[in-house]
Amino acid sequence: MAQPPSRLRELSADSSTTSPARGAEMHANLLQKLRPPPLVHAWDFWHDRADRRAPTSTITAAPSPSSPNTTPSYEARLAHLSAIRDVRSFWATLNNFPLASLPLRDSIHLFHHGTAPVWEDARNVHGGAWTFRVPKPAAAQFWREVCMMAVGEQLQAAVQRQAQGPKRAFSDDICGVSLSVRFTAVLVSVWNRDAGHVAGVQEVLRTVLEGLSEEIRPKSESAYYYRKHAEHNGFKAPPAVGDEGGKTGTGEAEAAQAGAEEVEGGDGGSGDGEKKAGGSRVSGGVDAVVKEVEDMGRAMQEVALQSEDMQEKVAAAEADDSATGVVV
C-alpha cells in the first residue's frame, strides 16, 4: 500500500542523505576527487629577461633574504612567473608560456621552491649542471620532456640511486632545469646540488638520454657537457660557503677569483668544521688555530664587499661561453 504524500515528505526531511552535514561531506568528497594530484616537490617558474633593466632611482632597497641575487640589476632581470604545486598548475604553465617567442639571451627556469636559479644560491654553490645544445626546431619538445622528468622525480631518483656508500655531508638533489636562447640553438640545463657526486652526475646524464624521445636524443657527445658553477668566469663565491642548518657539501666550489677561499663548518657548531685553502687541509696545533682565526677575519671582510654589477657578470659569462665553444 502506498504511503501518503505527507508521510513521504516527512521521511525525506528526516533522511541523513539530505542533512546539511551530509551535504557538506559529499561536497568535500567531490572537491577531493576533482583536485589535481599534488607534486612531490613544490616548484617555481622564473623568467630571466635580458632587456629588463634595473630601476634608475638612486635609492636602493636592502636585498631580501629570499631574493635570487643581491644585485639590483639581476633582481630587475629575474621575474617569478608562477608557483607550481600540482599537475594542473604545471601543465597550465608549460602549455601557456610562449616558448617560441622567447627572445635571444632570455632564459626560463623551473626550480625547486626556495632555490633561486643563480650559481651563488646556497643550494647551488657547490653544484653544477649538464647543458645540452638543442636545435631550435626540437627545443619545445626537449624542454617539455626534461621538465616532465624533473617534476616526475626521475632526475631526483637518479642522484639518490647513486648516493650509497660513505655518509655524505648532505644528500645530492636536483635543483632545477633551465632553458636559454642562443643564436642558432637553445641550451637546456639540468642543475644538481653536488658537483663532487660523480656517480650521481653520470646517472643524471644517463637518465636524461634514456628518457628523451628517439627523434630528439643527442646523437653526439659534443652536444652536451657538464660544468661546475664555480668554473664559470662570472661566478663569485660567497666568503663562507655553507648550506641549510649549517651543513656544508663535499663538492667545494672552486672560485674563479684567484686566492678565493672557502670556510666550512659542521652541524650546529659541533667543532669538527674544516678549512680548505689551496687544496691543503689545516689541522691541529696552535698554529692551525691562529691561521683559522686569520682566515676567518679575511672572510668576514669579504662579507662587506658589494656584489659586482650584473652587467659585468653577463659579459663574463658570454666571454666564457665563447671560450668554451658554447653556441652563442
Image (cartoon, rainbow, N blue to C red):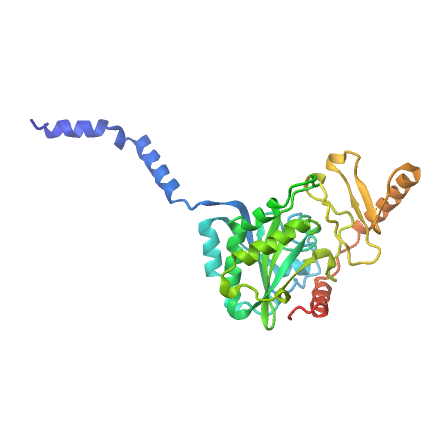
Left or right of 228 on screen, residue 148:
left
Q: Nearer the viewer, residue 205 or 170?
A: 205
Q: Which residue occupies 89% across, 39% down?
A: 289
Q: Quadrant of residue 217?
A: bottom right
Q: Quadrant of residue 282?
A: top right
Q: Which residue occupies 54% across, 56% down?
A: 210
Q: How many marks?
A: 0
Q: Is residue 268 above or below residue 200?
A: above
Query: Which residue is at the far bottom?
Result: 184
Q: Percent position (x, y) of residue 113?
A: 58, 48
Q: Is residue 204 above or below residue 18?
A: below
Q: Percent position (x, y) of residue 152?
A: 51, 49
Any part of residue 153 in sight: yes
Left or right of 277 on screen, residue 210:
left
Image quadrant holding the C terminus, namely bottom right
Q: Percent position (x, y) of residue 125?
A: 70, 51
Query: Which residue is at the far right?
Result: 287
Q: Nearer the viewer, residue 295 or 139?
A: 139
Any part of residue 67 in sight: no
Q: Percent position (x, y) of residue 106?
A: 59, 65
Left or right of 253 on screen, residue 115:
left
Q: Which residue occupies 37% across, 44% down?
A: 34
